[in-house]
Amino acid sequence: MSKSIKNSLLYLIPSLSGVLLPLISMPFFTRVLKVEDYGVLALCQAYAVFINSISNFGMNISYERNFFEVKEYEKTELLYTNLLFVFGTYLFFGIFTYTYQEKLLIFLKIPVSYSSTLLLAYFATGMTSLKSFYLIYFKNMENAKSFVWYTLDESIIGFLFSIYFILYLKIGIVGMVSSQFIASGIIFLVLTRSFLLKYKFSFKYALLKESFKISFPLTPRLFFGIIANQFDKYILGLMTNLGGVGLYSIAQKIATVVFTFMTAIQNVWSPIVYKLMFSKGEDEKDKVGTYLTPFYFISILFALFVSLFSEEIIFLLAPKEYHGASQIVILLSILYSSYFFGKQNQLIFAKKTYLISALTLFGIIVNIICNYFFVKYFGVIGVGWGTLISGLFTGLLGYIISQRFYKIAWNKPAILTISLLFLSSTLLLFIFNYLEINYYLKLAYKIIIILFFIFWGFKIKIISIKHFQILKFSTNNNI
């Protein structure tokens, strides 16, 4: 467990810096850029995520899974094979985006003057996806230091370029996507050179074929999943305006810290969970739920902090016209915290990827219906409720089906009490905000809830003094 905690600290450094650095710059950028600019950026990035997710055919997911089945000498061959295929599709859809950029902008309800923003957003997102194959390799090899080094470098480079482009050159939101593209491109080239010098390049069709067995059934899921995830922004743009999209985008950027934090510590538990799943001993498999429970508690504690103090975070980061986003942050924090159960990849392990696609198709239908009606009657806050309700419903259904094919023996009493405490605390704060309760009473409530949650973690023995001693030891030894 001590190694997991030490690796958690390492993985948290680049993951949190990748979120915190943009948040640090937000007070400056929100006073230079308009709310509508953030709306345009959100729609351009939504398109970029959608196209890039479809173009890689889920190869990054199959690569992570098959990594543990291939022989040791085939691990880099599998990396090169998958990466070369995705690089080819990346170029193909880049040409497509360039050729039809004006029509795409009209479809997205974005002024044609933002064509360069759309194109650069695609290439920046795609470059980040390509680089992720190397990071998966480091993660699965439990090489946390290399993972941290290259991810942190990218965050810092992107941050510095965004400051230069937006505050000094004053080129607007195109500066954001340009800085991301430059940072990801530099790290991708450095990693490619490093791997080619160390490992001979090799492309094997047999390995690509095996990857397709896992990834190809995921393509419909990726297609529908990205639509579901990005539909909220698109419908806001259609039914409200770019300002509404911008406000929602700011809320999403802040709430995404919850998902990013969870993904950071997933880098610790994911390889261990896969190893336990592949273990032939039933005793080892039964340890999965027990092993994951402390990670769930830590994820929820972080989500609780973000949701409870969303009002203060927005106040510090953005001017008055953005303050309405705090209520949306609360709703999205609840949703993102629930993604913990969907990160266990039970259906992928069981090679039931077709079910993932079916679940995602069902989810997108529910998402579209919920968002349409909630946005129609409640505006910007409606998309928060619609996304939350549809996400929780489909997530619960996915959990039930996943448990049928690979059952994780969860610590149900601990999971239920943690979840209920989190939900009741955040929703009660939402009501307090709606009723305009005195701020100092709300602040006292927030502090009490956080302290009680930590106390409860000790009470049910999910966290202990021993964990803090390990952290202290790790810090003293510069781990």
Image: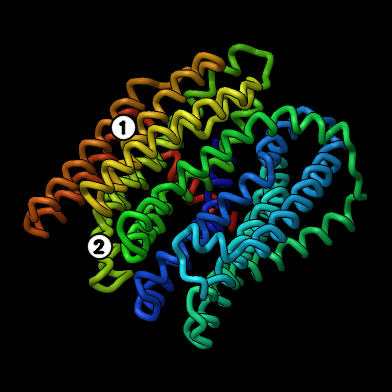
Disc 1 packing (10 Å; few <14; some 14–19; many ≥20) = some
Relative image position of residue 151 (x, y in whole percent): 62, 59
Residue furthest out toward the top? 282
Q: Tell me if residue 446 can be seen.
A: yes
257 with respect to 56 (left or right)? left
Residue where numbered disc 1 is placed: 419
Task: State how far apart marks 1 and 2 are (Cα).
Answer: 24 Å
Q: Nearer the viewer, residue 381 or 309?
A: 381
Q: Tell me if residue 149 can be seen.
A: no
Number of on-image labels:
2
Q: Residue at x 15, y 49 (%)?
A: 445
* Type of the residue with mark 1: Ser
* Type of the residue with mark 2: Glu
Contact (CB < 8 A) between labels 1 and 2?
Answer: no
306 with respect to 230 (left or right)? left
Q: Residue at x 37, y 70 (%)?
A: 36
The quadrant the N terminus occupies is top right
Is residue 2 placed above or below 95 in the rendered structure?
A: above
Q: Quadrant of residue 298?
A: top left
Relative image position of residue 318 (x, y in whole percent): 31, 71
396 with respect to 427 (left or right)? right
Instruction: Provide the secondary structure element on which disc 1 rests.
Output: helix
Disc 2 packing (10 Å; few <14; some 14–19; many ≥20) = few
Q: Residue at x 87, y 56 (%)?
A: 196
Relative image position of residue 83 (x, y in whole percent): 78, 48
Residue where numbered disc 2 is placed: 312
